[in-house]
Image (cartoon, helix red, strand yellow):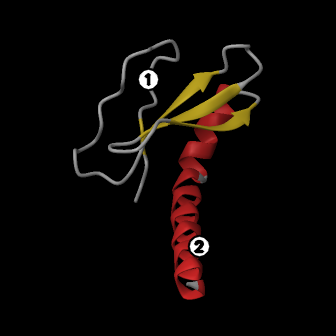
Amino acid sequence: MRPHFDPSASCKSSSVPQMATARSNSPYLSVRPYDDKSGWYVEAWWIHRPLEKIGHFATHSEAREWIELESAAYFVLREIGATMIKRSEQSIS
């Protein structure tokens, strides 16, 4: 599950980015500025899931670096955690 990143995505674009494939379980990631100009966040577009705003980065390059180096692990660990919670809840009932 490798996230898709478009390094050329415009920070001011309001259109929905293209997805890699209709069957992809990976998000399309783009770096965006906060409206209040306090920093940057990573926007994750999913198919069949709501849009996500992830993180608060001081610079555009920090956000891009997070995408390149840490995003894949972030999404994998998040899915593992969700699976563990579901199993735990099922064993209680």
Question: How far from the left and from the top, in percent, is residue 72?
Answer: 51, 56
- Between 69 and 88, the one nearer to me in the picture: 88
Question: How far from the left and from the top, in percent, is residue 6?
Answer: 41, 32
Where 72 falls versus 93 (above or below)? above
Q: Quick one: label 1 or label 2, which is nearer the N terminus? A: 1
Local crowd size for mark 2, using a 10 Å CA cut-off: few (<14), some (14–19), many (≥20): few
The residue at 47%/35% (across/down) is 51
Give the side of residue 65 with respect to residue 29, left or right. Answer: right
Residue labelled with disc 2? 85
* Residue located farthest toward the bottom when viewing the structure as drawn: 91
Question: How far from the left and from the top, in percent, is residue 9?
Answer: 44, 23
* Residue located farthest toward the front when viewing the structure as drawn: 93
Give the side of residue 19 with respect to residue 57, left or right. Answer: left
Residue labelled with disc 1? 9
The residue at 35%/27% (across/down) is 17
Give the side of residue 85 with respect to residue 56, left or right. Answer: left
Rendered image quadrant of residue 42: top right
Rendered image quadrant of residue 47: top left
Q: Secondary structure at mark 1?
A: loop
Q: Amino acid at mark 2?
A: Ile
Give the side of residue 23 with respect to residue 65, left or right. Answer: left
- Between 12 and 22, the one nearer to me in the picture: 22
Counting labels gives: 2
